[in-house]
Amino acid sequence: MEINIQKNVLEANETEADRNRKYFNENNVFVLNMMSSPGSGKTETLCKTLTKLAPKIRVGVLVGDICTTNDADRLAVTGAKVLQINTDQFGGDCHLAAHVVEKYALELGCEDLDLLIVENIGNLVCPAEFDIGEDAKAVMLSVTEGEDKPLKYPVIFQVADIAILNKIDLLPYLDFDAGLAVENMKKVHPQIPVFEIAAKTEEGLEPWIQWLKEKVAQKIGRK
Amino acid sequence: MHEMGIAEQLAQIAIDSIPADIENPKVEIVNLRIGKMAAIVEHSLTFCFEIIVKDTPLEGARLEIDFVPVMVHCTGCDNEWEVEGPVFQCPNCKEGKVEMLSGREIQITSIELV
Ligand SMILES: Nc1nc2c(ncn2[C@@H]2O[C@H](COP(=O)(O)OP(=O)(O)OP(=O)(O)O)[C@@H](O)[C@H]2O)c(=O)[nH]1
Ligand SMILES: [Mg+2]
Ligand SMILES: [Zn+2]
């Protein structure tokens, strides 16, 4: 006997993501989901970026880190409200699921925020699959990784709204071809805006900060 | 990597779909539709599924996967085609915005009881 079902297996996550979206919209907070391989420089980029947004833009950060609170401590000095996410045991150590984001977003409280950044777990596969109710997804690649990453992990570059190429201060010391990396990103996602930055030296941060400010302004309707 | 979570959801939906009036139900096949661009590794999913369904009506059930091609549409020139590699540029106009029509689904379509 065959029983017809026709259901999306990720339906539960999507229902929870919709609930998050509603909560974020009610509070007019722009939510960015930041994804990359481990060590690409998400936390460093946020540290340098957030100090330039405060106090005009009120920022919150949820940082998914498997076993330490290092990232949360680094981010706390920027003046942002920061909460460390401890991922749950099953299927939670490679990405943040919507219900996990919900729990921590409620604990952090979005009522007094303009921008919420979710630093996802360092991974280029799983986070792409899970909607968390965000307004936009950013994917980061660093020049120490390899120009072909976008072709090897096309889904994440395809679903991202913007891409950041980080650590360009190291280009003189490597044979990484930045032009080729950007070209590969555009093969996977022709219209994707790419910001080339060095979080460490703060080179190239301005256009990315401008992008964030515009998104926040649009969301809170001050534009 | 996230296949454990997917397998759990899958098993839950399958179990909830078994009619309550069947005595000692035993599921033989679970039919799935999985997009070629969904990040699912078949053998990890099978492996996780086998662990999850121990001592349930799904124990021993086989996963039958129908892989769905990645179909895209160019909003610039209305072209539609199947993407086979990681390249999403429109082969016709080169610059149109490309939207995905299929290829990312993770669906359970039916279960077959013994
Ligand atoms: N040279 C250079 N190093 C950088 C830059 N950005 C980050 N780093 C270094 O790269 C390492 C990893 O940076 P993080 O910001 O911790 O990276 P992450 O993406 O948050 O890492 P996970 O949270 O573990 O996934 C640190 O040692 C940083 O100092 C950069 O622009 N240039
Ligand atoms: Mg980090
Ligand atoms: Zn076209």
Image (cartoon, grey):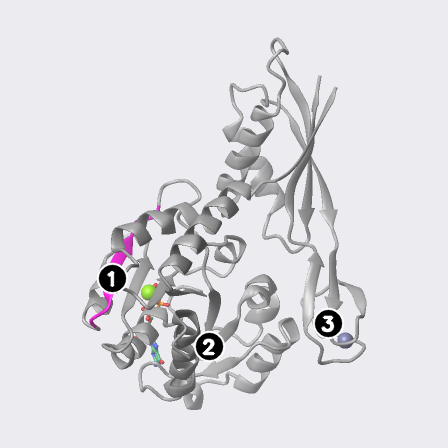
Q: Where does residue A38 sit, x and y in percent of width and height?
A: 40, 64
Q: Position of residue B86 (x, y in %)?
A: 67, 67
Quadrant for the N terminus of chain A in the image: top right
- Disc nearest the viewer among 2 and 1: 1
Left or right? Give the position of B89 relative to A204: right
Magenta stretch contains residue B83: no
Quarter of the figure with the C terminus of chain A: bottom left
Query: Label 3 vs label 2: CA separation?
Result: 25 Å
Quick check: B100 above or below B94?
above
Label 3 residue near ligand 3, CB within 8 Å: yes
Residue A80 drawn in magenta: yes
Q: Which residue is mark 1?
A: A82
Which residue is at 47% across, 64% downward?
Answer: A135
Within-10-Å neighbours for mark 2: few <14, some 14–19, many 20+: many
Tell me if A10 is positioned left or right of A119 in this view: right
Q: Indicate the position of residue A215 as horizontal and vertical percent values.
A: 43, 74
Q: Is residue A119 left or right of residue A76?
A: right
Query: Could you confirm whether marks 2 and 1 are on the same chain?
Result: yes
Amino acid type, residue under disc 2 in the picture: Ile
Q: Which residue is mark 2?
A: A164
The chain containing the residue under callout 3 comes to B
Image spot of residue B63 (x, y percent): 66, 33
Q: The residue tagged with tag 3: helix, strand or loop?
A: loop
Which amino acid type is marked by label 3? Thr
Residues A172 and A218: in front is A218
Please, what secondary structure does the residue beneath circle 1 have?
strand
Query: Is residue A32 visible to the viewer in this orientation of the structure?
Result: yes
Q: Amino acid at mark 1?
A: Val
Q: Chain of mark 2?
A: A
Magenta residues, start to end? A79-87
